[in-house]
Image (spheres, coloured by chain):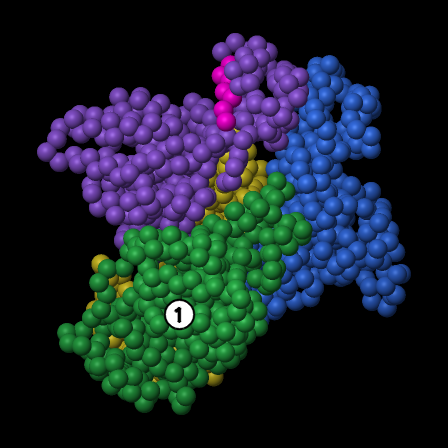
Chain colours: A green, B blue, C purple, D yellow
C-alpha cells in the first residue's frame, strides 16, 4: 500500500490462438517488464481476459501509445486499458449502520485500502460523528419530505461532487434507479447481507432464521437494475446454530459483511475484476 | 466408535422454571451419572430441549422406569426418550453417483460410522460392485417400465426388509411421495447439492454457474413433502472462481456433499438432532 | 450490546455427582431464572465448570448472599463468582501497528464491543492520532533512554490509572516481566501473529515464509511468564500460497490477527473463558 | 477424470525478460493451442515457473522435438518437461490406520483420482481386507524379527515391483532412510497429522491437546531426510474446543488428514506442484 508507480494493462477480447504471444511481444518491444500477470480463457464463450502489472520503467510508460499498439495486434472490438496503479478515489454511501463504513474508513486511515475515501453520503445523519472523526467529508442527504426522484438527484449530486471512480454502498438501504446506476456504469459495489441468491430482498437474517440454515453469509456485487442480482465479486459465510436468534445472526453477519465488502472493494480498486456477462472474472 | 454401553436421555417439552433441577434430581436418585449433557431453551417458542449421556451404571439402566419417572416431573406432553447408545441400522438409497454412498460405506468399514449400513437400495444397477465389495446387500429396484407408485412400493419394500432406524438418500435422484415419507417420519435424511435455499430443484451446479457464485455448497436435511425444504441438519461450502465450469463445480461439490452428508448421518445416529418446527436443534 | 442487567454465575470446582442439581436448586429457591447455561466436566481431571446467565429478577440479585449459598452446597475450594453482565473497562497496549487497536476502537465506537476501552498505552507516539480520534485517552510511555524496569513501572502506572479489568496487548512489541504479569493475573490477553505453537518468538511471517506453509494464522492467548506459551483463547488461519512474500503474508495476517483478537476480547469480556491449567474452557 | 489426451508442458528456469513470449512462440509455430497455463516468477530468487495444458492436436505431439525446441529458447539449465496428462501409477504405503488409504482407494474406484493405485505395501496385515476389496494387490512386509535395513530393502522391493511414479505414505508409521528417499527423489508424499511445523514428531494430537490449541490440522508434504520438514504441498485445519480429548481430536483429525492427503495426491498426479528449495509452487 506504499508508493506504487506501476501500470496495469487490462485486455478483454474474443479468444484467438497466440494472444499472449502477441501481447508479450508488444511489451517486450518497449522493454516493459511484466511483474505479474493473469490470463483466463472462457472456453464456452471463447473470450480472453488478461491483466498484467508492468514494472516501473526507466522513463514514463507511454499509456496511449501502448494501448494503440496492443489494440493493433488484438482482435477487433478488443477492450484495452492501460491505467496507473494508484489509490483511486471512492465515495461510500450508507444509511445508519456503521460497521461496513467504519471498516472502510479504518482501512483507509491505517493505509490498508488501495484507494481513498473522498466522501461519504448518507440519507440519515447518524454516522456523521464516525465519518468526521476520520477527517472525511460527510453529506447528509435526507429523503424525508422529498420525492424519490428529487432525493436521488440530490444524492447523486453529492456523490458527483467528489468525482469518484467507484461508488460503494456500505449498507445503503435504498434502491437506486436505473438512471442512477447508469451514471456509474459497472462502478457501483453493494454489500448484501446474505449468501445470494439465497435471501435476496428485505430482512435476510429473519429469512435465514426461519429457514434454519447452519451458515449465514454476505455477498458483494456490482449493482444492476435487477435487485440483488448483479455480478458477484466476493462471498463468504460464517457458521450459526439453533441458539442464534435473528439478532445474533445479524451480529455475526456484520463481521462477515464488513470483511466481504472490504475484500471486494480492494479487488475493484486494484482493477482485478472483469465483468463477464452476469458473472465476474477475478484475478486474485 | 468402540464399544459403547451408555444410555441417551432425550427430553423435549414446554419450558418451565426448574426443569434441569427436576431432571437431574430423577437421575441422581437412581445414582445415574451424567457424562455429558446439553440443553437449550428457545426463548421465543418457550420450548426446552435436553440431551444427556448417562455413564454405564453398575447394573442395567431401567429404561422404562426411568422414562416414567422423568415424565412424571415434566410438563404435560413432554417427549421423553431413553435409548441405548448403539450402532443403529440404516439403509442407504442411491441412483448412480458413488461418492456419497462410497463415503458412508468406507466410514462403516473402518469403524468411523456410529451406525451400520444394513442395505443399499438403488434404482440403477451401476453401484452394485461398489456396495458388494463391502459385503453389504444391494437391491436394484429399477423404475423402468413401472408406474411411479408401483416402483415406490417395491423400493420401500426393499428398504423395509432391513428394518432401518434411518433412511439416508445419498444422491437418490427420485422424489419420494408423501406416503413414503410418512413411513419413516422424520427419519429420512437427504443430501442436496447446493447451499439451500439457494438452487433448490434440479441442476444446482448449472444454476450456481449461471449466477456466478463464489462459493458452492451442500445441505443435508430431513425429507418433508415440500421438495428441498425440510429442516436442515448440516451445511458447508467450498470456494470456486471464474475458472470453474459447471462440471468442475460438480467435482468440487462432490467432496463437500460427502462430508456434509457424513456429518449429518453421524449426528442423527448419535441422536443429537431434534426437530423444532421447520428447523433443527443440533447438540454437537 | 444494548442495556444489559443480567448476572453471570461462574463455578469452577472438583467434580462430584449432582452438582448441577445443587446449583439449580439454589437458584430456583431464589426464583432466579437461568436464561442460558453451559457446563463442562473434564473427565481426566475430574473438574467441573459452569456458567449461567441469570435473567433480570424482580428485585436486585443479592450477589453476596447468592455466592455464599452456592459455596455452601459445592465442594471445598470451589471458586464461585457472581458478576454483573456489564461493559467492563479495558486498557489496550500497542506499539506502532494500528490494525488490532483500530479494530477494537471501532467495535467500541459502534457498540459492538461488550466492554469499554478506557485508555490506550503505547511505547511509541505513532498511534496517538488514531486513538484520540475516538476520544480515548492516549499515553505515550517511551522506552527510549530508560532502563527496562523504569519503563515498565511507568507503563504499568499508566495502565493502573484507568483501573481496567483486562489488559489487551494489541501488537505491543515488548515482553512483560513476571512482576507486571502478576499485577493483572490471568487478565492480560495478547495476540500473537502465528498459529501457535508454530512460529513462536520474533518474525513469525518470515518463519512461515521460509517453511513454505499454506496457511498462516493468529493466536490470542493469556500472557504468562513463558513467552508465547500462555493458555490459548482463540485461533484462526487464512490460506496463502507460493505467490505470497513475507510482506503479503503479514498483510493477509493482519486481517486474521484483528479478528482473532476481537473474538478473544469479546469472550473474556463476557466472562466466557475459564483457565484450566495450561488450557482454557471457552463457553461460546 | 474421463479420457484425457492432453500434453502438459512444465518449465522451471532462471527468470529473464520475454520468457512467456518465447515459449508461446514455440508452441504457436507448431499450431499447439494452450488450453490453460500458469506462470509464476519468484522475484526474490529470480526464478520462473510455467505450466501449460496443450489441447489435443490434430496429430500426436512430438514431445521430444518440442522439449528440444523449448530448451533452445530458454536460459541454460532450464528444466523442461513435456508429459502426457494421464492417470499415473502410484503405490500407497500404510501401517494400520485405514482412513487415508481408504479415501484414496475409494477415489480411485469411483473415478475421482487422476491416477491409479497399482499396489499397497504395509508393515502390518490389518488392511489387507480393505485393499483386496478394491482389487488392488496388497503386500504385507512385516518389520518384525528383521533389521531395519533388511525390512526397508524388502519394503522397497515391493514398491519397485509396481514401478510407480509417486509413492504415497498414507499414515505409514516408519521413518524412511535417506537411501530409500533417494530412490524416489521428490516423488514421495507423506501426510503428517498436525499443522506443521507445530507438533512434528510423535503423537501430535496429544501434543495439541496439552497445548490447548483451538484448531487441529494436517499437512501433506514431500519426504526429505529431515523428519517432517519436507516441502509442504497442502494443509488444512478443523476447529476443536475444550471438550475434545486427544482421542476425539484424533477422530476429527482423521477427516482432515484424508482430505489434505487426497488434495495433495491429486495435485502431484496432475503435475501441478514444483519444488522450489524448501517450498513448493502449486498451480491450482
Q: Quadrant of the C terminus of chain A?
A: bottom left
| Residue A90 percent coordinates (x, y) | 36, 66
Magenta region includes residue C81: yes
Q: In the depicted view, which residue is nearer to us: B32 or C28?
A: C28
- In the rendered image of this protein, does residue A13 appear above or below residue D213? below
Magenta region includes residue A273: no
Residue that carries the numbered disc 1 in the rendered image: A158
Classified by dominant secondary structure, the portion drawn in magenta counts as strand
Q: Residue at x 65, y 40 (%)?
A: B282
| Residue A101 percent coordinates (x, y) | 41, 56
- In the rendered image of this protein, does residue C155 appear above or below residue D184? above
- In which quadrant of the rendered view does residue C26 lie? top right
Horizontal side of residue C28 vs B156, given as left or right: left
- In the rendered image of this protein, does residue A205 appear above or below residue A41? above
Q: Residue at x 69, y 47 (%)?
A: B279
Label 1: element kind? helix
- In the rendered image of this protein, does residue B126 appear above or below residue C176? below
Q: Residue at x 36, y 44 (%)?
A: C105
One can see residue C225 in this view = no
Q: In the depicted view, which residue is nearer to us: C72 or C44?
A: C72
Name the residue at the front extreme.
A145
Q: Which residues are magenta?
A: C78-84
| Residue A264 percent coordinates (x, y) | 42, 62
* Chain ID, mark 1: A
Amino acid at each position: 500500500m506504499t508508493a506504487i508507480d506501476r501500470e496495469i494493462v487490462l485486455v478483454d477480447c474474443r479468444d484467438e490462438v497466440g494472444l499472449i504471444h502477441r501481447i508479450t511481444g508488444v511489451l517486450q518491444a518497449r522493454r516493459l517488464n511484466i511483474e505479474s500477470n493473469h490470463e483466463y480463457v472462457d472456453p464456452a464463450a471463447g473470450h480472453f481476459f488478461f491483466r498484467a502489472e508492468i514494472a516501473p520503467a526507466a522513463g514514463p510508460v507511454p499509456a496511449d501509445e501502448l494501448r494503440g499498439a496492443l489494440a493493433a495486434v488484438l482482435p477487433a472490438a478488443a477492450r484495452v486499458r492501460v491505467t496507473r496503479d494508484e489509490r483511486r478515489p471512492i465515495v461510500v454511501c450508507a444509511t445508519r449502520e456503521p460497521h461496513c463504513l467504519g471498516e472502510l474508513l479504518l482501512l483507509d486511515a491505517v493505509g490498508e485500502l488501495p484507494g481513498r475515501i473522498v466522501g461519504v453520503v448518507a440519507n440519515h445523519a447518524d454516522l456523521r460523528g464516525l465519518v468526521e472523526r476520520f477527517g472525511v467529508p460527510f453529506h447528509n442527504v435526507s429523503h424525508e419530505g422529498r420525492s424519490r426522484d428529487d432525493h436521488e438527484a440530490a444524492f447523486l449530486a453529492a456523490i458527483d461532487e467528489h468525482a469518484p471512480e467507484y461508488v460503494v454502498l456500505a449498507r445503503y438501504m435504498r434502491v437506486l434507479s436505473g438512471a442512477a446506476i447508469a451514471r456509474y456504469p459497472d462502478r457501483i459495489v453493494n454489500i448484501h447481507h446474505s449468501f445470494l441468491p439465497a435471501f435476496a430482498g428485505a430482512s435476510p437474517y429473519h429469512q435465514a432464521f426461519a429457514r434454519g440454515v447452519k451458515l449465514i453469509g454476505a455477498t458483494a456485487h456490482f449493482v444492476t437494475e435487477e435487485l440483488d442480482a448483479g455480478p458477484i465479486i466476493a462471498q463468504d459465510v460464517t457458521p450459526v446454530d439453533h441458539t442464534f436468534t435473528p439478532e445474533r445472526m445479524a451480529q455475526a453477519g456484520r463481521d462477515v459483511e464488513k470483511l466481504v465488502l472490504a475484500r471486494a472493494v480492494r479487488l475493484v480498486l486494484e482493477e482485478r475484476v472483469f465483468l463477464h456477462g452476469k458473472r465476474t472474472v477475478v484475478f486474485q
